[in-house]
Amino acid sequence: MKHQNEYRDPALARVQLQAIRRAVAGCDRTITFMEVCGTHTMAIYQHGIRSLLPEQVRLISGPGCPVCVTPVGYVDQAVALSRRPDTIIATFGDMVRVPGSSSNLLQEQAKGATIRIVYSPLDAVTLAEKNPNSDVIFLGVGFETTAPTVAAAVLTAARKSLNNFYILCSHKTMPGPMAALAGDPELQVDGYLCPAHVSAIIGANAYLPLVSAYRVPCVVTGFEPLDVLQGVLMLARQVVAGEARVEIQYRRVVKPQGNLKARNILYQVFEPCDARWRGIGDIPNSGLQLRLEYHRFDAARRLPVEIEPAIEHQGCLCGEILKGKVRPNDCPLFRTICTPEDPVGACMVSGEGACAAEYKYGGWGLGT
Amino acid sequence: MCLGVPMQVKTIANDMAVCEIDGVQREASLMMIDDVQIGDYVLIHAGFAIEKIDEGEAQLTLQALREALDLGLMPE
């Protein structure tokens, strides 16, 4: 893969680690950085980065796995929609095993519902074209990386005058929850490893208000191990110097202004709305809803269904895990009742959830 | 979910590109980026190229990492 080998060079990683150790050598307190993005969480676990960092530097996982922060009521709505006749649910693979209050999409499929896992939202548009007698509902979950691709699918469906393509929208945006967590006195986040590909769209400048409001350093960081180590080093240097700035480590992809063309597509179709984040609660203007002129594609408006009352599993600590307040091992269900084969919480279902990462790669002294 | 795969553009037709990585080819929409040439590396997410990969910046980052090595910041 392009640049993958270079950005995984162990010799350069050792040098970065040494630089991190030197940077924090005089620091007598614990410095806490939050990796916001689920893809960072996986990379950090996969490469054992926690175990390599000096003991003063603590990494905590944040709310950047879109599947994990999707409220249980959304899954219940998708389940209810899947029970409609002549309905095809099209979704990214992560969503099918997320538990709703009493079922999930995979169980509904076993009972006869038509669930199609797609690679691109455009595949869902093609499904609608090929199945004119069915309603095709795409589950619109994801941050600014994904939302433009779903917006493009809506525009494509509009251009093709499809009247059987819908989305069930639960898109969310950064950096709203980062501000919410930066203001949480229980957390004490000293810096953010900002999401790599969300930032490709929104641009590093999107974090400037967060930095000025909370004086919290932000470094937009790539997903390879050397990227993560360099991002940690840049954050550590800011903290030790008493600075709070936005920096870009992942310069080969992310620009200060982001991708304006993608944002134009995104905001042609969607507009900001308040959104509920699992574990964090309601955050103003942190979600996306279809604009008025695209309401005809809105499954929630056009395809009303009765939805069961949302019930969160008692004892599941996903909410606290998503805020970085506890680690997967602190949850009494972890590895006992809640496993990847039979997950209770979304953090165990998603391939990028903190619990799934801890389950897969933890237990090697890396999870502390 | 925000995984992006760096792929090389092989052919372009009507704002769609065939991109390749490690022998695997995928079609991707180019509607979100401008001025793509055959041979460029792009970041593919969910069937769309969402950004070009800047080869110059990639080399500069690696150079900075290697300079630390040259400066004698050797591991203990």
Image (tube, rainbow, N blue to C red):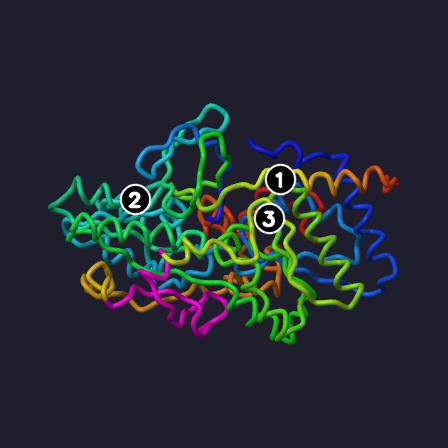
Instruction: Please state which of the two labelled residues, at mark 1 or mark 2, is closer to the viewer.
Output: 1
Marker disc for residue A358: 3
Q: Given the image, on which type of amino acid does mark 1 rest?
A: Gly
Question: In the displayed structure, would residue B67 be above or below residue A102?
Answer: above
Front residue of B16 and A41: B16
Image quarter (top left, top right, bottom left or bottom right) of the C terminus of chain A: bottom right
Start-end of magenta stretch: A265-292
In percent of width and height, residue A199 lies at: 53, 55
- Which residue is painted at 86% across and 42% down in the image? B73
- Which residue is painted at 50% across and 48% down in the image? A339
Mark closest to the chain's N terminus, 3 or 2: 2
In the picture of the structure, the residue carrying the numbered disc 1 is: B56
- Which subunit holds the residue at mark 1? B
In percent of width and height, residue B27 lies at: 36, 34
- The reply to whether residue A101 is visible in this rendering is no
In the picture of the structure, the residue carrying the numbered disc 2 is: A122
Q: Is residue A281 shown in magenta?
A: yes
In the image, is A285 to the left or to the right of A155?
right
Check the image and name the residue furthest to the front.
B35
Q: Given the image, on which type of amino acid does mark 3 rest?
A: Glu
Question: In the displayed structure, would residue A117 be above or below residue A288?
Answer: above
Q: Given the image, on which type of amino acid does mark 2 rest?
A: Leu
In percent of width and height, residue B52 lies at: 50, 42
Q: Is residue A56 shown in magenta?
A: no
